[in-house]
Amino acid sequence: MTGRVEPHLFVIFGGTGDLARRKLIPSLYELLVDKELTDQVAILGVGRRDHTDEDYRAFATQSLAEAGIATEHADQWCGNRFHYQSVGNDDGYMKLAQRVKDLDQLHGLGGGRIFHLALSPSAAQSTIPQIGESGLASSDGEVKVVIEKPFGHDLASAQRLNEVVHRWFDERHTYRIDHYLGKETVRNLLVFRLANALFERTWNRDHIESVEITVAEDVGVEGREAYYDEAGAVRDMVQNHLTQLLTLVAMEPPIDMRPESIRSEKVKVLASMAPIAPEDIVFGQYTGSNDIVGYRDLDGIPAKSTTPTYVAMRIAIDNWRWQGVPFLLRTGKRMPMRTTRIFIRYREPPVHLFHGENTGHRNLLLLTLQPDEGFDLYFDVKAPGDEIAIQQIPLSVRYEGHLGALTSEYSTLLHDLMEGDQTLFVGADEVEASWRRYADVLDPVTVDPYPAGTWGPQRGIELPLAYGARWSEEEI
Ligand code: BG6
């Protein structure tokens, strides 16, 4: 990353919302202080309600305090940097346009603007034309727009959203967020695969038998019942986060590291994905267990909801590299633990020379993306003693011990955005290709129940067996 951060006004639509409070404001602080960029940026919160600049500074200070930043620092940093503008009235956007100009002059920002839409897809759809029509999208400086996940609700709505975005912003200035791409360990995937000849040579159907991608969460829907019941596990996690992991694992090496080169390889993977067969997908929904209330018993969830809180699927990638290798994807709420992992099972050796109970292992590679980030490569060794007894042991590396603390995903993404690097953002064609792949599996009519705190319904546990594979927790 070599770009320079030009001065700009960072405008947060949904400025007093949950995302602004929990992620954006603390990450802006972390980034701007760490990179000494504080003087380059002023922040304007935008919302429908009326608030003063002072109210917004208090909100920002509170958000920083919640993120563990001492109040006197937070207070001082927020200083005259935070402003607020309401767009709740009829002429709200005209007033906003004037306010943006005034703040540009006040802080000497040269017309640079970033509009971060911390909004739902439908609110983003209606906000973008108002930004465009009020003249906010044109300026002497560079103007960028940031759109949060989920990008649309299905293929048609994503296409509509892309269409309205492109009416006012070209693709080069459009940044679609998938916060998984900001995670250090996800960024490391390409380095791991392509900088290490050992893995680069073996990363194909000749050597790999199956690939598992699991994103398990121990939490439930955490107060977002209305959103979640409309979305479900495929929209909330698979279409974006798991698919990003899948494409990074499966893509061909790009010709160089330019964002467009990487994106075009990712799109090819999506195009090679075969339609998902009904027997290759299992939907689940958690039921109450111990002191955890079941999904359908939550306030605001219909008693007969068939929204999946779990999904497991087998994906076939019909190309030269991966023909015949099952990609097993799985995500769920209220699972036994929080873990994001990629598990690669290598093929067995062609001949078994060592006979006995404990032989016939495969090499296994477990990449743990969170928490306890690191990797474990399992291989066979001879146990000490006269007999040839074989034991499988891991070679393990944990990032934190070797490389120190990892930066937060939002500050990574915001920094790239400010520098103009789109590598970690999702392209228009990529987001549409992904919705297209999952079009038939977004809204199941039935879900298998599973008790909260377990690894999902029985059919999901058994899904890999049809392909001679097993989920990682059963194998190691
Ligand atoms: C969000 C989903 O995009 O990702 C949430 O909407 C989910 O439902 C979250 O909990 C998981 O993110 P992370 O970074 O905690 O793995």
Image (cartoon, rainbow, N blue to C red):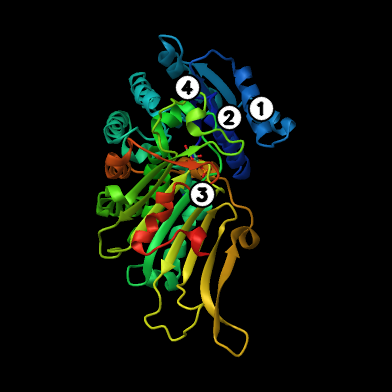
Q: Is mark 3 within 8 Å of ligand 1?
A: yes
Task: Residue 178 in the image: state x and y as whole percent.
Answer: 43, 42
The amino acid beneath tag 2 is Arg
Asked whether residue 82 is in view, the answer is: yes
Q: CB of mark 3 within 8 Å of CB of mark 2?
A: no
The amino acid beneath tag 4 is Val
Counting other residues with Cα less than 10 Å from the Cα at mark 2, is it few (<14), some (14-19), or many (20 or more)?
Answer: many
Counting other residues with Cα less than 10 Å from the Cα at mark 1, is it few (<14), some (14-19), or many (20 or more)?
Answer: some
Q: Give me the residue at 27% from left, 53% from top.
A: 273
Q: Is mark 2 within 8 Å of ligand 1?
A: no
Determine which residue is flagged by label 4.
Answer: 100
Determine which residue is flagged by label 3.
Answer: 183
Q: CB of mark 4 within 8 Å of CB of mark 2?
A: no
Q: Earlier in the sequence, mark 4 or mark 1?
A: 1
Numbered mark located on residue 21 in the image: 2
Helix, strand or loop at mark 4: helix
Helix, strand or loop at mark 1: helix
The amino acid beneath tag 3 is Lys
Counting other residues with Cα less than 10 Å from the Cα at mark 4, is it few (<14), some (14-19), or many (20 or more)?
Answer: many
Helix, strand or loop at mark 3: loop
Q: Nearer the viewer, residue 323 or 350?
A: 350
Q: Earlier in the sequence, mark 3 or mark 1?
A: 1
Numbered mark located on residue 425 in the image: none
